[in-house]
Amino acid sequence: MFAGGFLLLLFCGWALLNSDFTQPEPALFNGKTTLVTRDTIVKKTVVSGKAEPATAPVTTTLTFDSTSEPNRGLVKRIPPKIGDILEEEDLIVAYENGTEMTAASRAQLTDLKFSEHSDPNKPAELVSFTLQGLEKFHVRLLVPEKTSAAVQPGHTVRLTANNREYSGFVSEIDSSSHYEDQGQQSVRTVYVSFNQQPSDIQPGQPFKAEIIITGIARNVLCLPKKALLQDENNVPSVYTISSTGQLQKVAPVFGLSSQSQIEIIEGLTENNLVVLAPAEQLQEGLIDKNE
């Protein structure tokens, strides 16, 4: 009995002695790493809103009779047929005295009227015609006020209608906002013009419109977004590997980001070694096995 207790006491003392003087093996890290490099970051942001039907607000109706143009005489040449599109300076009508009237801007002939005569041998006279201006053919896009702060005149716009895509640009932005959806949302009106006036679009055509905002940062420090680790407050950080091979947690200041890269404004330098796809279990002080 005494011998057994003595042996147990001796064993416990040996275990305690060894626990005091035996150093644990250093924890190792053998994950993938990447370097901080310089590159160009291109970020594209798409701003959407409620697109209203296309409109062409400029309409011109010209009326003629035997006395309205006393110095020119009767119309000698009549306009083209209804539906035709006139480009700037295209001939609209010609008068008997040789003078002509041309289109001041791109327009579409939407109405054409002639006088009626009982004498079939007497040619019909032009009474009036209507030109629907196309130069100001545009789409109104209602953008949420908070989002509209990033929109500027000249930004590229992608327009879609009838499964066809058109290109345009922001031509004007209302200075004040107003409420839509029964007062539920504050929006700002953005006017979108076409880069090339479409010939297959009529006023009232509904559109889907997206504003493309492109940001570019050239020759900046950057690293793959896969190197970021988000904490519980969504604050991004990275793990770097020091010259002695130990992991250090750093919270840099980040800038512009693309789909795969993110700009580093402060906190890291070129060629810093950074852990790629860090796990939440990583800790500072771990030793890189690859060193």
Image: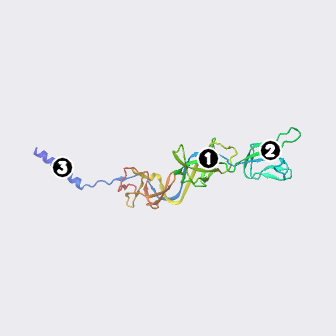
At horizontal 47% and vertical 52% (from top left) the residue drawn is 225
Disc 3 from disc 1: Cα separation: 80 Å
At horizontal 62% and vertical 46% (from top left) the residue drawn is 159
Mark 1 Cα-neighbour bin, 10 Å: few <14, some 14–19, many ≥20: many
Give 165 or 142, whichever is nearer the viewer: 142
Give the percent coordinates (x, y) of residue 88.
74, 52
Quadrant assignment for the C terminus: bottom left
Residue 22 got which mark? none
In the rendered structure, the answer to whether residue 105 lies left or right of residue 23 reads right
Give 168 or 12, whichever is nearer the viewer: 168
Look at label 1 and name its amino acid.
Answer: Leu
Give the percent coordinates (x, y) of residue 182.
53, 43
Q: Which residue is mark 3?
A: 12
Q: Which residue is mark 2?
A: 127
Give the percent coordinates (x, y) of residue 124.
84, 42
Disc 1 from disc 2: Cα separation: 39 Å
Q: Which residue is mark 1?
A: 159
Disc 3 from disc 2: Cα separation: 118 Å
Give the percent coordinates (x, y) of residue 180.
55, 45
Q: Secondary structure at mark 1?
A: strand
**Contact (Cβ within 8 Å) of mark 3 with mark 1:** no
In the rendered structure, the answer to whether residue 201 lies left or right of residue 272 reads right
Mark 3 Cα-neighbour bin, 10 Å: few <14, some 14–19, many ≥20: few
> Which callout, 3 or 2, points at the residue further toward the start of the chain?
3
